Amino acid sequence: MGKQINYWLGYEDFLPIAQAALDSGCIIIKSVGGKLVYGNTLDIVTKDEQYYYFYVPEAGELNSRQLPSGDECIGGYDSSGNVVIEANFSYRNDDKKWLSRSRLYVISGYYNDGAYISRPESVTKVYNKLVRVVKKIAPYTELTDTYISTRDEDYLQEKEWKHKEYISPEFLELKLSQNYSLR
C-alpha cells in the first residue's frame, strides 16, 4: 500500500516536478544499463528515460541492492523504498496513438522482523508538495470515452463512460483532437 497520483503528461511537463523535488532537497536517481545514476541537477532528467526516483536524504540512508541479473536497484517494500518517491512521465506512441499513464508513488511503510516501520514524515511532505505541482500542470479534467458493452441488457451497444483524470493541456489536446487513447 502507499499513496499515488496517476497523471498523463510529457517530458517537458515533468521537468517542473523534478525541479520541485530538487528544490526540496531530493537527489534524482535513474537506472541506465542496470546501474544507478545519481544527480542533483535537472540535466539528469532526459527524454529517453521515463522512470526516476526522488531520494529524500533527510528520511534516512538509501541502500541499493543487486539483482541476480547483476542490475542495481532500489525501491520496493524495504528501507530503500521508504526514503524514495517513484516518479515518471508518460510515453507517447504516435504510431498507435496512445499515451501511457504515469505516476508519483510512495510506500506507506514496510515490515522489518515483524516490526512495522512507517514512511518518514519528510517523504510525505515532499510527496504532497510534488502532488500540488502535478495538479497545477495537469488539471483534473472530466473526459468521456466510449466502449462496447458486454452486459446482458445492452450487449454490444456503444456506451459512454465519464471519468476524471489529471492530464496536461498538451495531452488533452492529443486525446480530443487526434483521438489518442490513455493507457
Image: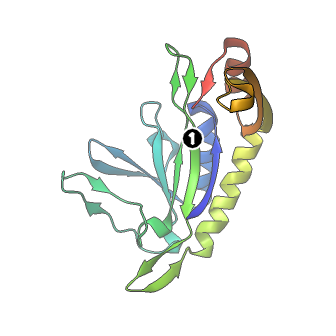
- Which percent across, then down, holds residue 168? 70, 32
Position of 165 relative to 23 (above/below): above
Residue occupying image coordinates x 61% and y 23%? 181
The number of callouts visible is 1
**Is residue 138 in view from this perspective?**
no
The color scheme shown is rainbow
Residue 141 as seen in the image, left or right of residue 96: right
Q: Looking at the rendering, which quadrant does residue 135 occupy?
A: top right
Position of 75 relative to 116 (above/below): above
Residue occupying image coordinates x 55% and y 65%? 1
The foreground one among 102 and 150 is: 150
Residue at the extreme front:
152
Local crowd at mark 1 within 10 Å, few (<14), some, or many (≥20)? many
**Is residue 175 in view from this perspective?**
yes
Q: Quadrant of the C terminus?
A: top right
Q: Given the image, on which type of amino acid does mark 1 rest?
A: Ser
- Which percent across, then down, holds residue 142? 81, 34
- Which percent across, then down, holds residue 74? 37, 60
Residue 113 as seen in the image, left or right of residue 171: left
The foreground one among 63 and 146 is: 146
**For the residue labelled by badge 1, is the local secondary structure a helix, a strand or a loop?**
strand
Residue 111 as seen in the image, left or right of residue 26: left
Residue 55 as seen in the image, left or right of residue 17: left
Q: Which residue is mark 1?
A: 102
Residue occupying image coordinates x 49% and y 13%? 95
- Which percent across, then down, holds residue 92? 53, 24
The foreground one among 80 and 107 is: 107
The foreground one among 69 and 50 is: 69
